[in-house]
Amino acid sequence: MSICENIMDSSFILIGSTHGFIEDFLKQKEIILNVKPEFVLSEELENIALISNDTFEDFLKKEEMSNMTSFKEVEKLSLLCFENNIKLVGIDFENFGYNKNLQRKLKNKEEFSKEEGEELDKIISQRERKHLEMILRYKKKTSKPLVIVVGCWHLRKDGLLLKKLKDYKIIHPCDERGELLLSPGENKNIGYKEITSNDN
């Protein structure tokens, strides 16, 4: 699917990421090169801001990210933004705000206790508020559309971003029924779907 012609008419272009179920970067690259934004905002970049040649060069040279995100997960997007003179800004907390215990359990896909589950829900709410706050802050800094890469789950209909943002376009991976892709499943016919704020 090619990018629709009126993509530049939206203030916010939200790209759904599967965090590795599929090759997310190809669609990100297509959109970013079409839009040529001043800023790309990324959940996966956590709290790192790459806004000058020096910050990009240091980051790319060190090849280190965090306990929750490997450098490989953000390398292609970082290089693309660096080569095209686009500022890349993380809109989340370091390690997504998870303590060492939650980090370990998430990485090992371990079961959570009731208390840990409640703590996780609380942190996820804080993260979504942080995403929104950063998006609104950076919209004031540019007249171009903002390109925002977040996990597909944050683009659900009852999510904070869709409730609070206006004038957006969402481009997200979907299954054969056109539903938001939230897990690897057994979907063979994965495609992309576009939604504008007028559709919701």
Image (cartoon, rainbow, N blue to C red):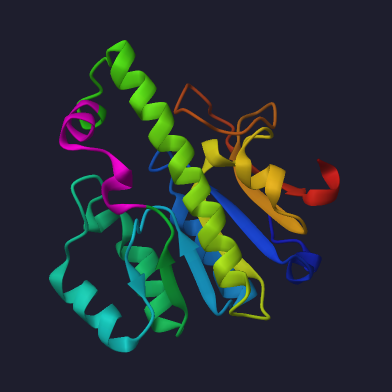
Depth check, front residue: 151 or 2: 151
- Which image quarter is the C terminus in? top right
Residue, x 73% and y 57% (percent of image)? 168
From the top left corner, tell me how far across and down residue 111 is, in percent.
Answer: 26, 14
Q: Is residue 111 left or right of residue 130?
A: left
From the top left corner, tell me how far across and down residue 64 is, in percent.
Answer: 17, 62
Depth check, front residue: 45 or 113: 113
Residue, x 29% and y 21% (percent of image)? 116
From the top left corner, tell me how far across and down residue 74 is, in percent.
Answer: 32, 59
| Residue 57 picture quarter | bottom left
Question: Is residue 19 shown to the viewer in this render?
Answer: yes
Question: Is residue 27 shown to the viewer in this render?
Answer: no
Find out whether residue 160 is within the magenta segment.
Answer: no
| Residue 169 picture quarter | bottom right
Residue, x 47% and y 22% (percent of image)? 185
From the top left corner, tell me how far across and down residue 183 is, in percent.
Answer: 47, 28
Q: What stretch of residues is rendered in magenta? A: 93-105
